[in-house]
Image: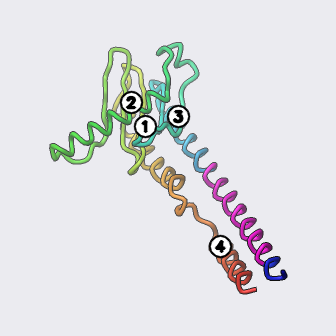
Amino acid sequence: MNKNWKRIKITRLKSDICRSVNRKLGEDRMVQRDEIHRELTRLLKSDTSIKVTLLGDRTGLTIARASRLLVSETMGAFDLESIGAIASAVFCGAAEQGSALTLGELGIMLAEFNDGKILTAQSGERGILVVVAEPDAQLGLIRVRMKESSESLASLMDKITEPSAVKIKKPESQSIMAALKELENF
């Protein structure tokens, strides 16, 4: 009976430690998400002709977005989730086409329309950065800002999507492991 009580106590302690570690990982991921949103907002504010910035993944999932307050009045109402999914699919299709033609890696893709422009760029291995701008936008500056933001967003996204990349301080993780081993030997 005494051994069963010890096992139950060890199991409870392990699960408390796991919950504590998971809570820490969750907090770190929230910080990363906030940083992604700040980076998208910084890109949005870098040029007045940019109306929407959006970060999605290669599967079409919109991770974060930022837009100006008057976008619906100036450009009409649209669903940003579907814009992200479509932009991801088009970008991935164009990248595949370029690969099949051995043209190298796709940098920035531009779609020009009568009432605006959509620029799409790779952001790390998984991310797709989308910028929607006015028709008279100066593309040179936007392209430079997109490249800078793509690199920053790629590193932030890697930290969110890979649990192993979210680091716990070594002394803390070592002390947790030592405590678990001690409990198992108890």
Where residue 128 sits in the image (x, y, percent)? 41, 41
The front one of 105 and 58 is: 58
Question: Residue 101 falls in which quadrant of the image?
Answer: top left
Q: Which quadrant is the C terminus positioned in?
A: bottom right
* Callout 3 crowding tier (Cα within 10 Å): few <14, some 14–19, many ≥20: many
Marks 1 and 3, the one that precedes in the sequence: 1
**Residue farthest bottom in this picture:** 185
Q: Nearer the viewer, residue 61 or 40?
A: 61
Image coords of residue 84 (percent x, y): 44, 32
Q: Amino acid at mark 1?
A: Gly
Answer with mark 4 or mark 1, whichever residue precedes in sequence: 1
Q: Is residue 31 above or below residue 46?
A: below
Query: CA gap, disc 4 to disc 1?
Result: 35 Å
Real-space Cα separation, disc 3 to disc 2, in angstroms: 15 Å
**Disc 4 residue type?**
Ser
Question: How far, Cα to Cα, is label 4 from label 2?
Answer: 42 Å
Tell me the element at label 2: helix
